[in-house]
Image: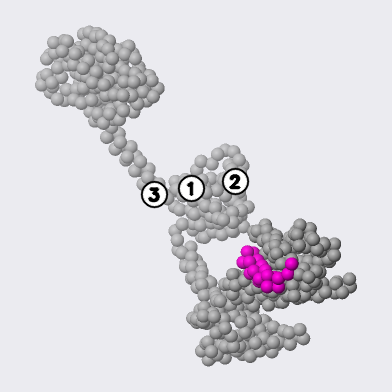
């Protein structure tokens, strides 16, 4: 039995050695594609399986017991389908060539071992394998081996399970654990090396290592691009004398030799290479005995930073000049409300409180000084509450316009910075404000002129049209009645012909006065419609209410008793048409009010004048003689 364990131990050693050699030399295959790496791993695993078959213990003629299954399972788990296929193909081909009674059983078991490796591979394909995964693979492989020794006819009839079942299963499991651990470590080392290589090669800085004579040992990709090489190998062995002008190369060489001789690193030394501004840091490299064997360098391209710093200096100088010569005042308050910066213009903008506006002053103290000097118009009586509210609102984006005691105006635009500070820009807007007030007054006067009849002082036709559209729409929304009076002075042409136009103008003024006295609500609108025609808009007024207004006007006009020899009544009279509508009519066709009022006025004139006649868009309400 000791001889059998010895043979199995040698078999185990061979399998572990084969996998260890692969782990040692696999680093060389990283230069090849991933497919080529998997093929190579499959070949190594297949070779390990073949070597195990060659070292197998012959249990019966044609029946061999060995550790061939462990490499195949590991090939499936760590190499995937490609590695498993190559490993199984090699092992099966060799086993087929060997032949023997248990050839078919052996081939089936080898395929099953690779199959459980593939299952493990697909279960962990989205993450890195762990030792627990190897342990589970080991248990699964043990199950496959035991199952094959009990279920496959040739090996079960030969009673392999009873004779070699335990050592073969145990040593296959041990081989799987040991080799799996080696492969896990290999992957971990490869990952760490890959990270280091990637970090070195893809660093945004220029990285390099030089020997004792300042010749390049290795460089990263940025160095290759800087000196226009294609590969790292092309720069290996070169020095700065091969790349730069001789004066610059000599300067760099002496600096590097000084670093290696003194052992003192060189940090952020400025260099000019290929027309670009650089900052170079160089440190000596030592072996285990502490001897300097070379140096490692990191060179950072600061061309853009240098340009930005230059622009910043220029901008700072320009800003200082602009701050001194600008007309606006600028102040900066920190998060706590303390003044941290202001220009002279800011203090000059507030002549009475300028002495309090100094760096270090708090906004509340400045506002208290403003209140004491009464510099600002409109400060409320509750002074402390005003100061508290103004201080709290300092750190918010806002635009203010304030008036000083002397009538001047200041615009204060406050904006928040990212750090919480508040910047205030103060402008003298006195001239602008005065022009704005004058413009507003002029606009108001022009608007009044545009909307007022010059003779009567009441609204003109343009103002009436705007008011009519606005008020009818409002009544339509509220579903309230809306009435309209249309008034025409009877025989007014004859009045002008008889008494002259000045008298006619005076007559129109008297009539407009009577109309204004006849309406009592601010919402009622009286307008001169044209010539001797007038209109009255009566929102929220029924036809009955409109009739009352018309009668009041007729009575007032009669009381004026303006003589008119050209009239059949002997005095100035008026004919009045009334129209009233609500709801749907106002929404669909508000102009029907005008049409009906005009029709009512026409009927009043044709039926004898000096009377009031009401029409409705829906029905006619009646007529009343006011003579």
Q: Which quarter of the image is occupied by the N terminus?
A: bottom right
Q: Is residue 430 above or below residue 256?
A: above
Q: Nearer the viewer, residue 380 or 555?
A: 555
From the viewer's side, name the closer residue of 553 and 141. 141
Dot 1, crowdedness within 10 Å: few (<14), some or many (≥20)? few
Is residue 574 in view from this perspective?
Answer: no
Query: Residue beneath label 1, please?
Result: 399
Looking at the image, is 585 positioned above or below residue 339?
Answer: above
Magenta stretch prevailing secondary structure: helix
497 versus 152 height, above or below: above
Q: Quadrant of residue 253?
A: bottom right
Which of the two residues, 101 or 90, is positioned nearer the viewer here? 101
Residue 373, label in figure: none
Q: Residues under labels 2 and 3: Cα distance?
A: 29 Å
Q: Camera-side residue: 117 or 314?
A: 117
86 falls in the magenta region:
yes
Element type at mark 2? helix
On the image, the x and y values in percent for residue 136 come to 75, 59
The residue depicted at 63 percent of the width and 64 percent of the height is 81
Highlighted magenta segment, given as a residue range:
80-101
Give the mark nearest the N terminus, 1 or 2: 2
SS of the residue under disc 1 = strand
Are circles 1 and 2 on residues that touch, CB within 8 Å? Answer: no
Tell me what residue is drawn at x 15 percent, y 13 percent. Answer: 606
**For numbered disc 3, what is the local secondary structure?**
helix
* Residue bearing the label numbered 2: 392
Q: Which residue is mark 3?
A: 432
Residue at 50% from the left image edge and 81% from the top image edge: 228
Residue 578 in sight from this viewpoint? yes
Residue 278 among those drawn in magenta: no
Location of residue 367 in the rendering, given as x and y in whole percent from the top left corner: 57, 48
Q: Is residue 162 above or below residue 602?
A: below
């Amino acid at each position: 039995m000791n001889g059998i364990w010895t043979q199995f131990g040698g078999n185990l050693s061979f399998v572990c050695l084969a996998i260890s050699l692969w782990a040692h030399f696999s680093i060389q295959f990283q230069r090849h594609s991933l497919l080529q790496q998997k093929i190579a791993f499959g070949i190594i695993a297949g070779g390990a399986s073949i070597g195990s078959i060659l070292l197998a213990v012959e249990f019966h003629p044609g029946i061999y017991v060995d550790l061939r299954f462990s490499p195949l399972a590991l090939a499936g788990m760590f190499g995937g389908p490609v590695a498993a296929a190559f490993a199984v193909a090699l092992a099966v081909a060799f086993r087929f060539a060997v032949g023997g009674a248990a050839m078919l059983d052996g081939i089936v078991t080898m395929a099953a071992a690779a199959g459980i490796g593939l299952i493990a591979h697909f279960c962990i394909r989205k993450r890195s394998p762990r030792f627990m995964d190897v342990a589970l693979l080991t248990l699964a492989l043990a199950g496959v081996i035991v199952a094959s020794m009990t279920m496959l006819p040739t090996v079960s009839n030969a009673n392999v399970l009873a004779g070699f079942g335990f050592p073969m299963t145990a040593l296959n499991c041990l081989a799987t654990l040991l080799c799996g651990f080696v492969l896990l470590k290999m992957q971990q080392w490869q990952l760490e090396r890959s990270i280091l290589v990637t970090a070195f090669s893809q660093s945004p800085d220029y990285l390099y290592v030089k020997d004792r004579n300042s010749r390049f040992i290795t460089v990263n990709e940025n160095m290759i691009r800087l000196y226009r090489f294609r590969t790292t190998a092309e720069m290996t062995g070169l020095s700065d004398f091969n790349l730069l002008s001789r004066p610059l190369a000599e300067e760099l060489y002496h600096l590097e030799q000084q670093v290696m001789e003194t052992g003192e690193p060189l940090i952020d030394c400025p260099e000019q290479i290929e027309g670009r501004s650089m900052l170079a840091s160089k440190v000596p490299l030592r072996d285990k005995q502490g001897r300097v064997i070379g140096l490692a360098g990191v060179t950072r391209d600061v061309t853009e930073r240098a340009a930005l710093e230059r622009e910043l200096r220029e901008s700072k100088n320009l800003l200082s000049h602009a701050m001194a010569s600008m007309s606006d005042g600028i102040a900066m308050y920190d998060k706590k409300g303390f003044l941290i910066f202001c220009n002279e213009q800011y203090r000059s903008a507030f002549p009475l409180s300028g002495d309090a506006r100094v760096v270090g002053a708090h906004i509340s103290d400045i506002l208290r000084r403003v209140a004491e000097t009464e510099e600002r118009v409109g400060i409320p009586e509750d002074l402390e509450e005003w100061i508290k509210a103004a201080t709290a609102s300092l750190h918010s984006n806002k635009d203010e316009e304030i008036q000083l005691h002397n009538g001047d105006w200041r615009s204060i635009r406050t904006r928040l910075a990212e750090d919480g500070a508040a910047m205030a820009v103060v402008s003298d807007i006195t001239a602008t404000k005065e022009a704005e007030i004058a413009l507003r007054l002029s606009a108001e006067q022009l608007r009044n002129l545009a909307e007022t009849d010059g003779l009567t002082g009441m609204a003109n036709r343009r103002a009436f049209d705007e008011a009519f559209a606005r008020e009818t729409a409002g009544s339509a929304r509220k579903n309230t009645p809306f009435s309209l009076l249309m008034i025409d002075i009877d025989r007014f042409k004859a009045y002008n012909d008889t008494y002259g136009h000045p008298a006619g103008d005076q007559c129109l003024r008297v009539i407009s006065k009577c109309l204004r006295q006849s309406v009592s609500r601010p919402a009622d609108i009286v307008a001169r419609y044209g010539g001797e025609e007038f209109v009255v808009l009566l929102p929220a007024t029924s036809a009955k209410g409109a009739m009352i207004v018309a009668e009041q006007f007729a009575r007032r006009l009669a009381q004026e008793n303006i003589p008119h020899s050209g009239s059949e009544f002997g005095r100035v009279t008026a004919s009045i048409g009334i129209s009233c509508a609500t709801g749907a009519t106002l929404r669909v066709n508000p102009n029907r009010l005008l049409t009906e009022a005009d029709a009512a006025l026409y009927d009043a004139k044709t039926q004898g004048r000096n009377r009031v006649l009401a029409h409705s868009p829906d029905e006619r309400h009646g007529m009343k003689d006011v003579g």
